[in-house]
Image (cartoon, grey):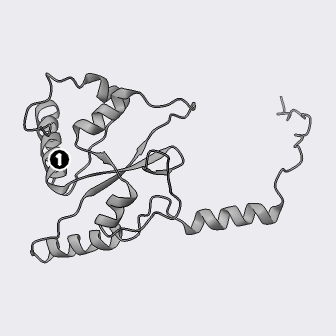
Amino acid sequence: MANKKAVGKPLLFGDATFDDDRIEQIRAIDANWDRSYVPGYGEKRMEYDLAVRDKRKPPSMPRLQWIRLGRVDGTEVGDNDMVAWALLGYRFMTKEDLEAFSYGMPPTAYVDPQGRIRRADLVLAFVDEARWKRNVAHQREINAKFHGHALAEGHEVISVSESNARRVSSADVDANYVDT
């Protein structure tokens, strides 16, 4: 029996809501901007990495993190997520904090009514270097305990999700892990 291809109705598309020039402008903007860019931070991070490479004392600098405040469905993240970030020592970045660290205002961000640096549903937060290193060491301990191995040096990743935050309780956190 010969294969016969079914003939269907042609797909119909509606009118484009944007003209081609506007779409190209949007694509050009997207291609040229790193939305997470914080002026001055990358340069300081480069100095830090070069100092580590050259076995010099690196300059102290905070760890920046864009934290999501909303979910895909448009609802706000719960208190558990914010508590989890707070337990890791993160604070919301303000314009004054940016100036204190000699960083510029991210080009795609704005200052919200609470004084936080925002972009879309994200807020910029930071943690001091010493606390960040303790967080990484703690995460390595957890990986070694539960997975039988620690993160390799240089892999300093800490993830916080709603599911992880629900498992964190005051009994789980020791005095070395939380600022008092």
- Decide if residue 63 is on the left or right side of residue 75: left
Report which quarter residue 37 is drawn in: bottom left
Measuring 12% from the left and 46% from the top, which residue is drawn there? 137
- Decide if residue 136 is on the left or right side of residue 11: left
In this view, 169 is above or below 4: above
Measuring 38% from the left and 54% from the top, which residue is drawn there? 94
Horizontal and vertical percent position of residue 105? 44, 64
In this view, 180 is above or below 18: above
Which residue, given by chain and number where applicable, does mark 1 sit on? 136
- Decide if residue 33 is on the left or right side of residue 65: right
Measuring 67% from the left and 63% from the top, which residue is drawn there? 27
Report which quarter residue 21 is drawn in: bottom right
The amino acid type of the residue labelled 1 equals: Val
In this view, 147 is above or below 154: above
Horizontal and vertical percent position of residue 28? 65, 68
Horizontal and vertical percent position of residue 112? 49, 48
- Decide if residue 57 is on the left or right side of residue 129: left
> What is the quadrant of the C terminus in the image?
top left
> What is the quadrant of the N terminus in the image?
top right
